[in-house]
Image (cartoon, rainbow, N blue to C red):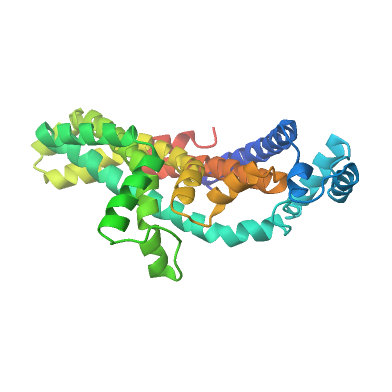
Amino acid sequence: MSDALSGALRMIAKRLSALALLMLATSFIVFSAMYLAPGSPESFLARGNSVTADTLQAIRDQYRLDDPFFERYLSWLGGIVTGDFGQSLQFRQPVDDLIASRLTTTATLVVYAFALILVSGIVIGVVAAVKRGKVDSAAIIGTTVAMGTPSFVVAIGLTSLFAVTLGWFPAFGAGEGFLNRIWHLTLPAVALALSSAALVARATRSSMLAEMGKEYVETARVRGLPESRIIWRHAFRNALVPVVTLAGLVVSGLLVTTTLVETAFGLNGMGSLLVQSVNAKDFPVTQAIVLIIVGVFALANLLVDLVYPLVDPRVRGKVGA
């Protein structure tokens, strides 16, 4: 086995061990925070019924809400290890089935938005760094406005213009089938992607400006290499490292921001489910979704570490160190 491969495997093993510890600590914090929150799940479950002490006690007995804290935590954690996230208090069905029914919409929306972020952010950043002048100024102004505009404001503006006024896209729902789903999710994806795309564009622009001013770029020009090759094969590749780092952070941020966008567009995804579960104090669903978000964040960071050696050969020798 080569030194590079063994180093990569050691690095992956270390990151996976850290991920397991992170998920364990997160599970305890999330479980504790939910039970420290004001209100109680039995009060929500008893809503609309004749609320008596016996009714509340029956609900607590049914959902084992009076069990000792650590007993509840260990029982819940053991279920998660075996793939059982428990029973939703609000919907009265298994949490894993509930999340699975919402996962396709959220996953498609996040992937769609992430693709828009990378393509538009990188293209705008590179063009702004290369063209300079009015193009660069317009890019700076546009990205500044985009970064400062909340996603729910963008959602309202897109719905008013493209759904209500022009009628080009639907205002609500996720659609059925691949093409119809993409059509329905275009406006939500743009609303979700706009601020992050602007952030990636600014990072790409700054990194490209730094690379374009280096000596190897001037040397390549003196040698007569085509400008497009200098930009994309040399400067852009070396400028990718900070962009890759930012992309890893963007993925986890999209899962959090999607709560606002899904609510604004009436999407039946994990984000809207999280909002409903928090409002209803549906502990099992809330805890499961938060753990998924933390897990995606950690896995995104692991992928960034794995991509680094491919983007920048200079760090290959450091992998596993």
Quarter where residue 44 is shown? top right
Q: Quadrant of the C terminus?
A: top right
Quarter where residue 94 is shown? bottom right
Point 39% across, 62% down: residue: 184
Q: Position of residue 287 (x, y in %)?
A: 68, 43
109 in relation to 210, above or below: below
**What number of labels is visible?**
0
Give the camera-side residue of 180 and 249: 180
Whether residue 165 appears in this view of the structure is yes
215 in relation to 27, above or below: above
Point 74% across, 30% down: residue: 36
Question: Is residue 47 shown left or right of residue 128?
Answer: right
Whether residue 303 appears in this view of the structure is no
Give the camera-side residue of 234 and 252: 252
Q: Position of residue 261 (x, y in %)?
A: 44, 47
Quarter where residue 207 is shown? top left
Q: Position of residue 130 (x, y in %)?
A: 16, 37
Q: Position of residue 64 (x, y in %)?
A: 86, 46
Question: Is residue 145 shown left or right of residue 245?
Answer: left
Give the camera-side residue of 44 and 126: 44
Point 39% across, 68% down: residue: 180
* Residue located farthest toward the bottom when viewing the structure as drawn: 177
* Residue located farthest toward the front when viewing the structure as drawn: 50
Question: Is residue 152 shown left or right of residue 169?
Answer: right
Point 48% across, 46% down: residue: 258
